[in-house]
Amino acid sequence: MPDSAPYPPSDPLGYYAALGVGPLADAAEIKAAFRYQAKLLHPDRNVSDEATQQFQRVAEAYRVLRNARTRRSYDATTIISAPGNLIDPTDQSPEPLACSRCGKVTAQPRYLIFRIIRGTLLSTRKDAVLGIFCRDCADRTAIRASTATWLCGWWSPTGPYHTVRALFANLKGGEKPRADNLWVILHQARAFLARGEADIARALAEQAEAFAGGPEERAAIAAIVRAAGGKARSSPRLKNRWRPWSYAPVVQALPLAALVVGLGVAVAAVVFRTETDSASAAIIVRPAQAGEIRHVAVDLLKVRQGPNASQPVVALVDRFATVQVMDSVAEGEWARILTANGVTGYVPARFLFGGPGNASKNRWCADQKGEPPANGEVLLRRTGGEHRLTVKNTSGHDAVVRLKTPTGRTLMAFYIDAGANVSLPAIPDGTFRAVFASGRDYSRACGIFLENMQTFIVPTAQVIQATMQAGRQQLALTLPPVGDGPGESRTLPLESFLDN
């Protein structure tokens, strides 16, 4: 992600990023990362003006993440993107999706949301368990969510209202977002079709018809049915696992007087794993092949020294990063990859989706773009100070402006309309260059314009020098028109605008 983008959904305040680890890091990795950062930022080794503030940031992150309770509270604020935003319908070699609870590939996945309500006398806490489920795990998760809600949901002024709503939603098998389930089922159908399982692909496409909402979606379903050989004359080979009723609603509907019995059934349901249907038992997942180009499908992927979860982590790779598969080991469960910066190591093959990540990233940036920025809105601030900066935009374009240090580090980014003036407080000491970008349809999540993005640099004559030697200062910056003449803004490579 570019440096002006907000932190990823799994790290809303950037604490993991401050330590240089991912949200899946264990306690030992977090402690080692803090020690390493503390050494780098110690005054004996780092005399930068920013070192003190950076160390305070690292210390705050470590204070939250080293404690299991505060880390759970922090992780509870994360926002998980729905699968419809991440699955690429144009992928030519899709891999089957696995259940997010048990980790096994299921022939009939569903994207479900289960609600949990907890009353705390004066307030009501509303949580959710969401993911891609097989039917068995969906039933067990529904029982867990409803049991927790039965026990804890009533004890606040609004608790009974939210508890009844949550129990009713869980009783029906959870919330089933239409668009997300459509793309999950169609992705699974394409995956089995690519593996020659035409009967399963056809049956899944027919199940997807219940989630279709328009001509384009129905056309996508029809295309899979045609590719699978058309409508079957006899009953499909795939047995529908998502019948309206099963044991789970019965357990959830037990009254409070029978709650102990309900808990016993829920525990039994978790311990007892029923066999999957014959179609899912026959699934063979094609391992990643040497030479394939794939992209990372999780927020942060750990690259390990060997094909085992206990091996040391050698690198962390961002979602959508494109990698090359060098080898497949452990019966296809692990793949040895080569990253763009030359790091090689082992990752679980199920976390790699086919093809480069550019198309998936572009879709995500568009889906998460948010509201257009307002004139003078600060989009990123890495540090503060005592000075004030007045900016005049004569470039002829709405612009996102970045103030960069001589080493290329972005300290601040803000938005300014064409022809507008803005005044920005809290400018730090130092020497800065100004670069700016223009375009249409700005994405807050990715820090870029989605259409017609162009990047420019303000002439060297307007280098900003802010120092406290003369006390608080009123600084000025003008974005000149774009051109090749003296004093005009010149074009800048996109990489230089986005670097670091």
Image (cartoon, grey):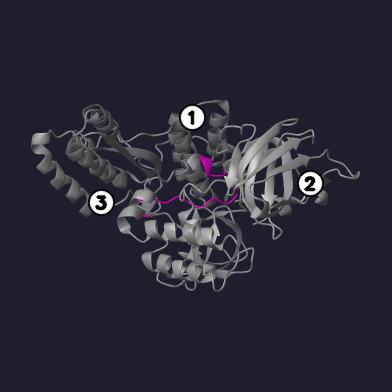
Image coordinates of residue 185 in percent, x first then y, are 46, 40
Q: Residue under circle 1?
A: 212
Tag 2: residue type? Val
Label 1: how many residues lie within 10 Å, few (<14), some (14-19) or many (20+)?
Answer: some
Distance CA(mark 3)–CA(mark 2): 66 Å
- Magenta stretch, residue numbers: 85-103
Q: Quadrant of residue 103?
A: bottom left
Residue 274, numbered circle = 3
Tag 3: residue type? Thr
The answer to if 289 sits in the magenta stretch is no
Tag 1: residue type? Ala
Name of the residue lying farthest toward the left: 257
Q: Secondary structure at mark 3?
A: loop
Image coordinates of residue 170 in percent, x first then y, are 28, 35
Of 129 and 488, nearer the camera is: 488
Label 3: how many residues lie within 10 Å, few (<14), some (14-19) or many (20+)?
Answer: few
Image coordinates of residue 175 in percent, x first then y, are 36, 34
Residue 458, numbered circle = 2
**Which residue shows up at 61% across the image and 41% down it?**
425
Which circle's residue, 3 or 1, is located before the other in the chain? 1
Of 316 and 333, nearer the camera is: 316
The answer, for residue 233, to whether it is visible in the render is no
Question: Taken as a whole, is the magenta stretch helix, strand or loop?
Answer: loop
**Which residue shows up at 61% across the image and 36% down it?**
377
The answer to if 98 sits in the magenta stretch is yes
Image coordinates of residue 259 in percent, x first then y, are 12, 39
